[in-house]
Amino acid sequence: MAERREDPESDDESFEVMDLTDYARRHQWWSRVFGNNSGPIAEKYSVATQIMMGGVTGWCAGYLFQRVGKIAATAVGFFVKIANHSGYVQVDWKKVEKDVNKAKKRLKKRADKAAPEINTFIEESTEFVKRNIVLSSGFVGGFLLGLAS
C-alpha cells in the first residue's frame, strides 16, 4: 500500500512504501471485528464463566459437526450404493491403493513447504489458545461431549 504525499513546492510526487506483513502483524483481524479493547478473555471473565462459555460453544459445535457429518456420510453412501448396484461404479482397488500411496508421498514432500499464511494462522491460533487456555479447554471438552451425544 502506498500513501501519496504532495509537497506544494515540488512537482514530484513521493510515496511511502508500507510493509504489509508488518502492518498485518500489528493490526490483528479480531481488533477490527471486536475493537481494540478485545484482549484475552482471561482478563474479562471468571474461570467458571470461561469454562461454561467454552463448554457450551464446544458442545454446540460438536453436536452440529456430528449431525452434519452423519447426514453427509449417509447421503454419499446411499448414492454410491445405488451407483454400484446399477453398474455405474466399479472400483479397481489396486489402482486406488497405488494412487493413495503416491498422494501420501507428495503430501510429505509438500508439508515442509507449507505456505506462510498457514504457518501464520497456526502461530496465531496457538497464541490464542495459550492466552485463553481455560476457554479453549472448555471448548474442547464441550466439543467432545457434543460429538458423543
Image (spheres, helix red, strand yellow):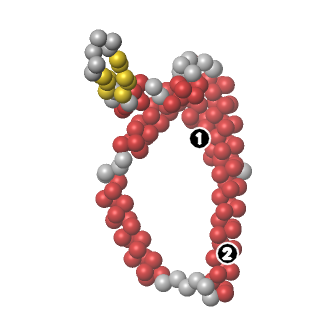
Left or right of 80: which side holds 18?
Answer: left
Write down the quadrant of residue 18 in the picture: top left
User: Which residue carries the number 2 mark?
Assistant: 79
For badge 2, the amino acid type reads Phe
Element type at mark 2 = helix
Q: Looking at the picture, how far across and down is residue 144, in whole percent?
A: 63, 46
Left or right of 9: which side holds 37?
Answer: right
Q: Looking at the picture, how far across and down is residue 30, in whole percent?
A: 54, 29
Element type at mark 1 = helix
Task: Identify the image quadrant of the N terminus.
Answer: top left
Extreme top residue here? 9
- Tell me whether circle 1 and circle 2 mark residues in contact (CB < 8 Å): no
The residue that appears at 30% across and 22% down in the rendered structure is 13
The residue that appears at 52% across and 83% down in the rendered structure is 91
Q: Looking at the picture, how far across and down is residue 143, in whole percent?
A: 63, 44
Q: Looking at the picture, how far across and down is residue 113, in whole percent?
A: 31, 51
Q: Indicate which disc residue 140 carries.
A: 1
